[in-house]
């Protein structure tokens, strides 16, 4: 029979997994954390199955007459809090490598749960930086960038208010994009210095683009969690549709579709300007996603390096697709390197670093072509956008796969070397006797 202590361990592990899932962790990381906590307490049989909407955990004493105990935890709402993921990773290492009691473990997890994110003014600063830098990178003027920063902040605050009403997340994104587009069109119509409506809209909707869902979906599928991977890809698709419908419906009702330019990737900025745009936009996402302070600079540098490589390849005449793949690979490689150096989750570096590469302009151009009834153009840009998004995901999977292979080979080599050393020591010792 399972004793009371083992039941408490099960609840502790489930609590840790719930916090990780609600903070936006990958499925394999949630399952691995739960199983390691249980096995560290000498529970012989543990099975864990997690999805984006629930966690199922079963354990048994291992005896013939033992009873199976199963707990189910429903996950209702997921947000992005990378600091909590980092802290729970640290907790699992401490719990499995020390004699920390279950009671102390519960207290540590409750402290992590109570821990807040960056303050509202700090997050608004990050949101404003995202709006301004993305607008500038799309050719917006300083007046456009300032307007974009204000509209992005207002839209994000409105989205938070709608979220508190427990509205469906896709409806929330749709309503936020409607408000964003209305504010942009009103500003362009009434402020002479503001002209780049397309750049402002693209920059403002960037905070809603499903870059995190795409990243986690790719990493889940890499680990064999096909159900969660497909679910997250579906979430990304529905979010994209909500953004396009929200922006497109307002533009159509405004009857000004002919005045919106088709945006191309700009490469006429000097390299240092592109680097700075990407650095500060990634920094803004670090503030929104609550990246630990010690990793903000590293994550921002990763995003800047990836985006700079992307723009450099575009400037040499290659296509958006050809530029996105190596840029995403660079982000993934740097993320793996910094995660090993900082002994923290790779997610902390890859999620904010990959966002500048998410094809927001491609989605906007697809919608513009649809509203203009240019269906061939819409099909072309839509397919290109889909390939870019898929290529980013595939790049993450490829790099992570090679990293795991290299780590496995290294561990196997060290194991073989250790065994050979032990045999040599035994052989030497026997000769001396």
Image (cartoon, rainbow, N blue to C red):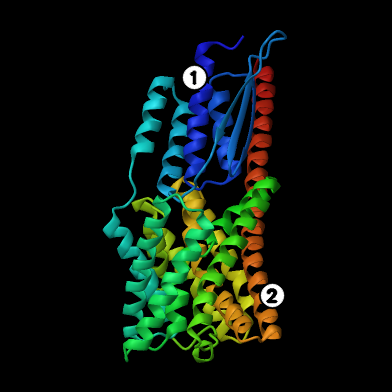
| Distance from the alpha carbon under mark 1 to that under mark 2 | 51 Å
**Is any part of residue 194 visible from this angle?**
no
Q: Residue at x 47, y 89 (%)?
A: 268
Label 2 crowding class (10 Å Cα cut-off): few <14, some 14-19, many 20+? some
Image quadrant in which you'd find residue 146: bottom left
Q: Which mark is residue 383?
A: 2
Residues 369 and 7: in front is: 369
**Residue 138 x %, y %:** 46, 82
Residue 261 as seen in the image, left or right of residue 141 = right
Tag 1 residue? 8
Image quadrant in which you'd find residue 322: bottom right
Residue 33 as seen in the image, left or right of residue 218 = left
Label 1 crowding class (10 Å Cα cut-off): few <14, some 14-19, many 20+? some
Residue 92 as seen in the image, left or right of residue 284 = right
Tell which residue pokes out farthest to the front in this image: 253
In the rendered image, the quadrant that contains the N terminus is top right
Against 73, is 383 above or below? below
**Is any part of residue 209 visible from this angle?**
yes
């Amino acid at each position: 029979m399972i004793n009371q202590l083992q039941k408490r361990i099960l609840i502790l592990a489930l609590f840790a997994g719930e916090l990780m899932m609600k903070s936006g962790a990958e499925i394999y990381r949630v399952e691995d954390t739960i199983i390691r906590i249980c096995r560290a307490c000498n529970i012989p049989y543990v099975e864990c199955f997690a999805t984006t909407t629930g966690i199922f955990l079963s354990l048994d004493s291992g005896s013939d007459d033992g009873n199976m105990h199963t707990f189910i935890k429903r996950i209702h709402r997921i947000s992005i809090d990378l600091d909590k993921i980092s802290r729970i990773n640290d907790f699992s290492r401490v719990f499995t490598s020390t004699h920390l009691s279950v009671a102390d473990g519960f207290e540590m997890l409750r402290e992590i749960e109570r821990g807040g994110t960056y303050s509202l003014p700090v997050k608004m600063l990050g949101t404003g930086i995202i709006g301004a830098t993305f607008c500038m990178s799309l050719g917006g003027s300083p007046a456009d960038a300032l307007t974009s920063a204000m509209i992005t902040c207002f839209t994000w605050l409105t989205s938070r208010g709608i979220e508190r009403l427990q509205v469906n997340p896709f409806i929330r994104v749709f309503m936020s994009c409607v408000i964003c587009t209305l504010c942009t069109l009103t500003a362009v119509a009434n402020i002479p210095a503001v002209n780049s409506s397309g750049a402002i809209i693209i920059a403002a909707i960037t905070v809603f683009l499903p870059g995190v869902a795409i990243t986690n979906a790719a990493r889940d599928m890499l680990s064999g969690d096909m159900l969660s991977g497909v679910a997250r890809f579906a979430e990304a698709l529905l979010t994209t549709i909500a953004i396009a419908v929200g922006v497109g419906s307002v533009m159509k009702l405004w009857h000004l579709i002919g005045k919106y330019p088709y945006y191309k990737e700009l490469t006429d900025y000097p390299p240092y300007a592109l680097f700075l745009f990407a650095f500060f936009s990634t920094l803004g996402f670090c503030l929104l996603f609550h990246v630990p302070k010690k990793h903000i600079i590293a994550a921002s540098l990763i995003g800047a390096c990836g985006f700079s490589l992307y723009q450099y390849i575009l400037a040499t005449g290659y296509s958006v697709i050809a530029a996105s793949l190596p840029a995403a690979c660079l982000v993934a490689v740097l993320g793996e390197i910094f995660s090993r150096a900082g002994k923290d989750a790779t997610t902390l570096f890859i999620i904010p670093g990959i966002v500048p590469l998410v094809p927001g302009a491609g989605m906007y151009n697809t919608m513009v072509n649809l509203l203009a009834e240019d269906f061939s153009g819409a099909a072309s840009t839509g397919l290109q956008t889909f390939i870019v998004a898929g290529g980013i995901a595939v790049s993450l999977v490829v790099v992570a796969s090679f990293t795991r292979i290299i780590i496995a080979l290294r561990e196997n080599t060290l194991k073989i070397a250790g065994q050979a050393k032990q045999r040599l020591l035994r052989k030497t010792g026997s000769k001396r006797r």
